[in-house]
Amino acid sequence: MCGIFGIRGHANAAALTQLGLYSLQHRGQESAGIVAYDNGRANGIRVMGLLGESFGPRELAQLPGRTALGHTRYSTTGSSTIENAQPALVAFRGGHIGLAHNGNLVNATELRQDLEANGSIFSSTMDSEVIVHRLARSHATSPEAKLAEAIEGIEGAYSLLVLINDTLLAARDRHGWRPLAMGTLDGATVFASETCALDIVGATYVRDVKPGEVIAVDASGIRTIDRGRNNPLHRCVFEYVYFARPDSRVFGGSVARARRALGRRLAIEHPAPGADFVFAVPDSANAAALGFSEESGLPLELALIRNHYVGRTFIQPTQAGRNAKVKVKYNPVREIMDGKKVVMVDDSIVRGTTTRGLVSLIRAAGAREVHMRVSSPPITGPCYYGIDMADRAELIAAQRSVEEVAGEIGVDSLGYLSLEGMLNAVPDGPDGFCHACFSGQYPTRPPTVPPGKCTE
Ligand code: AMP
């Protein structure tokens, strides 16, 4: 997963991009970068880790210009190197290309092999680099026609921001897998993965980039190519469940409202009569727990506290290390838990590591019964379209019944929201969403190389 942000026509383009990326840090913490274009020159800076830790006034001073785009990259199982950080920046016969990609391409390996057979030399293992090469090769005359040509035949999920000299381009795949919003600020045009990034820079939301659309912004204005007619939508439902920030609107719907509705529905499908209270695994399940509380009438308690200063430095490769990480990240409030029958709401269970650790912490804090409620269905397969979901073998629910998962994580009862319940709770549901990780209904063939892995 990644976050992307771009702006054209503003004197503080790079600084605003940095600000926007702060709001998209949750979409990627592995690396970050900004590219800016100024009078025939393009400059780029990419760093490993969090944006705030390595991007300061000195870096911004090296990024002059009125057009900029940026990227935050999510940790995947693939190689975490500076070569794979984005945005990509290359010089070609027509000037400069910068590119930031959110999503995962399904046929990147074949496309890359074709390009390599024709002499292309790749500098990263990212699937996105394929698009850079195809852009550079295109003989189409306008920047938007170049991008439309470059993405023709590419399968999978992509929301893209591209800079060709001082033209800023935005595109979404025909199925609308990943979000991308457009806004305006002081006459400049802004694009961002989520509207919370428009808010932070003070931009006004205009509309979403449409599935299949290519938009070009340059000195003469905004032009669009609409490539998306009559395509089935595969918007990622997990954006609503977990990934996006609750203060964002994605796919035209409020994430906070979606999560609250998921929680309400969960309370209808899996009530917990006789429990004393409900609490969230903060922060991603806060809104779902609120919805559960409203619907069930159980009081909502702030019974679990999250430490916000636990960064990626604490990642431990061993299982023992992972359990220790849970303890560093979360602490129950003993005075609230002690002697109580509690309902713990989380948005999802992936490997089960967090949940297992939490349940033992909560029992150690005195909870008498622990009833877990999950505001999405069991995750039974990996995501091929841009969310790092672990391999199938690591997914706790892939080979187990709900009862077996309950036994594994040590809860007194476990209730997952049904697929139908989830799809009916999210805005503009139930149709037009990709739910492959829950249902196994993959809209494409699997990629030749597993998501997040290197293509070499
Ligand atoms: P796990 O311990 O693997 O079951 O992780 C479950 C927790 O991770 C839940 O609290 C989710 O909010 C969160 N989560 C869900 N999906 C992801 C993801 N793709 N990457 C990181 N964390 C996730």
Image (tube, helix red, strand yellow):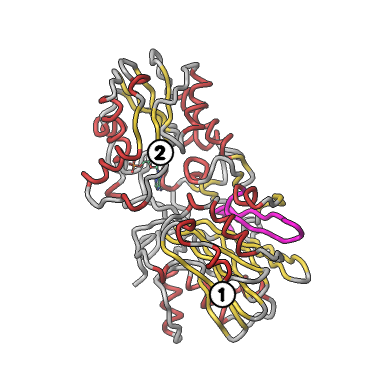
Who's the residue at 64% across and 59% down the image?
228
Q: Quadrant of ligand 1?
A: top left
Magenta stretch contains residue 294:
no
Q: CA distance from mark 2 to mark 1?
A: 40 Å
Instruction: Establish whether ligand 1 lies closer than 8 Å to the Cβ of label 2.
Output: yes
| Residue at 60% across, 60% down | 17
Which quadrant, please, contains the C terminus?
Answer: bottom left
> Label 1: which residue?
43
Task: Specify whether 399 is left or right of 11.
Answer: left
Q: Residue at x 45, y 83 (%)?
A: 120
User: x%, y% of residue 105?
Assistant: 47, 63
Q: Which one is in front, 57 or 13?
A: 57
Residue that numbered label 2 is attached to: 348
Q: Is residue 341 left or right of residue 431?
A: left
Secondary structure of the residue carrying tag 1 is strand
Task: Give the vertical position of 116 relative to 199 (above or below).
Answer: below
Asked if residue 204 shows in the view, the reply is yes
> Which type of secondary structure does the marked residue at label 2 adopt?
loop
